[in-house]
Amino acid sequence: MSFLTLLAIVLPALAVALSSYFLLKKFLDSQEKQKLYSLKSQYQKEALPLRLQACERVMLMLERMKPGSLLFRVDSSGLSAGEYQGKLLASIREEFEHNLSQQIYISASVWPLITAAREEMVRLINSAALELDDDASGKDLAQLVFQKSVEEGVSATEMAGRALKAEVQELF
């Protein structure tokens, strides 16, 4: 067998083998992309309700931390300012800790705004308590906290709520 005859047999076989390899590779890559898309689609179908539920819970937490809501919900009757301060801070802490796991579903850009809202509310309560006399009542503290919140204008709680609403809008 001569070299030319061998070359005439090997070259077409090599061409067929290479074209088969590239066609099979293209087909398998296409199948893999389709499977990934299917998995991602399934994940979105299952994760979207969880993310929406988390956003709802965090929004409710933010609403409950707003001064008007918090002061109305936590009764101040018969308490000193110090006792009422403790009840308010405990309420915020419990609410936040109850919803802490929701941060898994909230974006990394929005969650810091939520923690800032909690910190601002704690700061507002503590600064109002420091301005009162030792014999002040819980009602005095409630009035001062509400007054200070009105004076400050747009709160971190409102900004966090807006950011959370924007995040929910992006899901659709």
Image: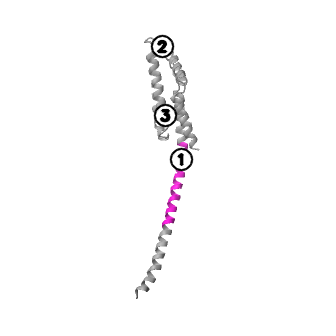
Neighbour tally class for label 2: few under 14, some 14-19, many 20 plus, Cα within 10 Å: some
Start-end of magenta stretch: 25-50
User: Compared with residue 164, is residue 70 higher up or lower down, i.e. above or below?
Assistant: above
Check disc 1 and give the amino acid type. Answer: Glu
Element on which disc 1 rests: helix
Residue 2 seen in the current view: yes
Nearest the eye: 86 or 167: 167
Task: Give the main secondary structure, helix, strand or loop, of the magenta stretch.
Answer: helix
Can you tell which mark lies on residue 88? none
Marked residue nearer the N-terminal end (2 or 1): 1
Question: How far apart are the two marked residues, 2 and 1, measured between alpha carbons?
Answer: 50 Å
What's the residue at 49%, 34% (across, down)?
113
Residue on which disc 1 sits: 46
Amino acid bearing label 2: Ser
What's the residue at 54%, 48% (across, down)? 44
Q: Give percent across and percent down for residue 90.
A: 45, 25
Q: Secondary structure at mark 2?
A: loop
- 52 up-or-down from 18: above or below: above
The residue that mark 3 highlights is 113
Measuring 40% from the left and 85% from the top, which residue is drawn there? 3
Where residue 126 appears, as percent x and y from the top left, is 44, 21
Residue 74 locus on image (x, y percent): 51, 22
Q: Earlier in the sequence, mark 3 or mark 2?
A: 3
Q: Which residue corresponds to mark 2?
A: 137
Which residue lies most toward the front here? 4
31 drawn magenta: yes
User: Is residue 99 shown to the viewer in this render?
Assistant: no
Alpha-carbon span between mark 3 and mark 2: 32 Å
Q: Secondary structure at mark 3?
A: helix
Within 10 Å of the Cα at label 3, are there few (<14), some (14-19), or many (20+) other Cα atoms?
some
What kind of residue is marked 3? Answer: Leu
